[in-house]
Amino acid sequence: MEHQDLVLTQVEEKFQREQLTALINSVGMAIASTSTSGIIRVYNPALLDLLDTHEYLGGKQLDDAFHLYDPGGNPTSLQQILAKSDRLVERDDLSHQFANGERINLSISYAPIKGSRTAETVSPDGYIFIVRDITKAKTLEEERKEFISVVSHELRTPLAIVEGAISLLQYQVDNKKDPAEYAPMLRSAHEQVIYLASMVQDLSTLSRVERGASDTVETININELLTELYRHYLERANNRGLQLLLELPPAVENVICSRLYLEEILQNFVTNAIKYTDAGTITIAAKDAGDGIAFSVTDTGIGISKSDQKRIFDKFYRSEDYLTRKTSGTGLGLYVVHKLARKLGAPITVESELKQGSKFSFVLSKKPADRYDETSEDV
Ligand code: ADP
């Protein structure tokens, strides 16, 4: 080759190399190449982000950078995994552990880079791999699977009771039994259908919340909203022999937020307060609290034990307490409330003492911009 041509080819090669480097550096996925013995050669900044390090990785052993665990939770070597590959492999069952013990789930695609090729053998010159952090996707997927399994389990029992009651009724009708005997069966079927309806209602609210279907905000007049809430529940409380009070200064400042979310949270607190209080008073209150409006619903009911207070926001959690068990409920209400409160950036506080009563409260910031919406981290 002429000297001039050689220089041209070198310039072209340099240009292509630079372009390739720029391309690899600009992608968000972590990419690296190694020698056959697992020494890191080339890598992009995304790999440093993924491994949460600023260290220079060139020349380092793969297994010094990655601390991998297999699906069984046992330490495993990335270098040995790569060494076994003879084609492109994709897997998402490995996790990496950081120095502080925290783990992330990884999706890794890897392949050998074939360096030299003779008629008989193909010898890899090294490996190339692409890694992604799929922790969030994995957690969501696991949560979804668990949720479906719990929902189907929760639906099975009431459906079995309804099915049993109806088939017994059918038998009694067919055999012309005394209609007075039908009553207990009818009542139990009816109760279970009401329970199923409330479960469907809670699930549909949950799905709306998760889709963000009611995220739209509007200016809300708190005095109107709470007065409306008070009027709506007054009869139900009185029918249970309870006093319902509204503590509201004449003009609480308006807030800008999703009406559905705020209403849903307060309604849940009030219905629970009515449900879990046998005698006494339920107080709905709102007041100015500097940068925010402080809302609370207080009851003089059965109360919640310290250990239950940690769990009542979990999905389907209902206290084992017999006083709770004699009421019907899905255990989804406060789970939905928790999600909504996070959307509004207003964490819920529970104060409660057994047999004394409970107070559920939260402070909603007056400025929507101050609200920290944690939902992006919500799983
Ligand atoms: P549900 O009322 O359908 O069981 P929730 O998610 O609304 O479900 O509440 C979860 C649990 O928290 C209830 O089962 C009950 O044990 C407890 N709880 C909620 N609110 C109160 C309250 N005001 N007083 C006593 N216990 C309560």
Image (cartoon, rainbow, N blue to C red):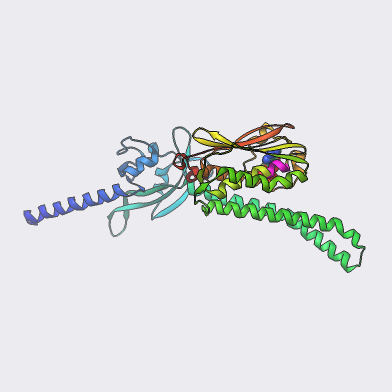
Residue reaching furthest front? 250
Q: Nearer the viewer, residue 378 or 29?
A: 378
Count of marks, rendered view: 0
- Asked whether residue 177 appears in the rendered view, the answer is yes
Q: Which residues are magenta?
A: 271-275
Q: Position of residue 246 (x, y in %)?
A: 66, 39
Vertically, is 196 above or below 316?
below
Q: Nearer the viewer, residue 367 or 230?
A: 230
Residue reaching furthest left? 3
Task: Tell me the residue at 33%/41% (across/down).
Answer: 39
- Asked whether residue 70 appears in the rendered view, the answer is no
The answer to which image quadrant residue 54 occupies is top left
Q: Nearer the viewer, residue 187 or 79?
A: 187
Q: Position of residue 364 (x, y in %)?
A: 53, 39
Instruction: Please check the rendered image and state whether residue 272 is part of the magenta-colored stretch, yes or no.
Output: yes
Vertically, is 325 above or below 9?
above
Figure quarter occupied by ligand 1: top right
Q: Position of residue 151 (x, y in %)?
A: 65, 52
Task: Tell me the residue at 37%/41% (across/down).
Answer: 49
| Left or right, residue 225 beside residue 35 | right
Vertically, is 218 above or below 348?
below
Instruction: Please check the rendered image and state whether residue 18 is part of the magenta-colored stretch, yes or no.
Output: no
Task: Tell me the residue at 72%/32% (across/down).
Answer: 354
Image quadrant for the N terminus?
bottom left
Residue reaching furthest bottom? 174
| Left or right, residue 68 beside residue 113 | right
Q: Position of residue 65 (x, y in %)?
A: 38, 38
Q: Nearer the viewer, residue 291 or 309?
A: 291
Q: Main secondary structure of the magenta part?
A: helix
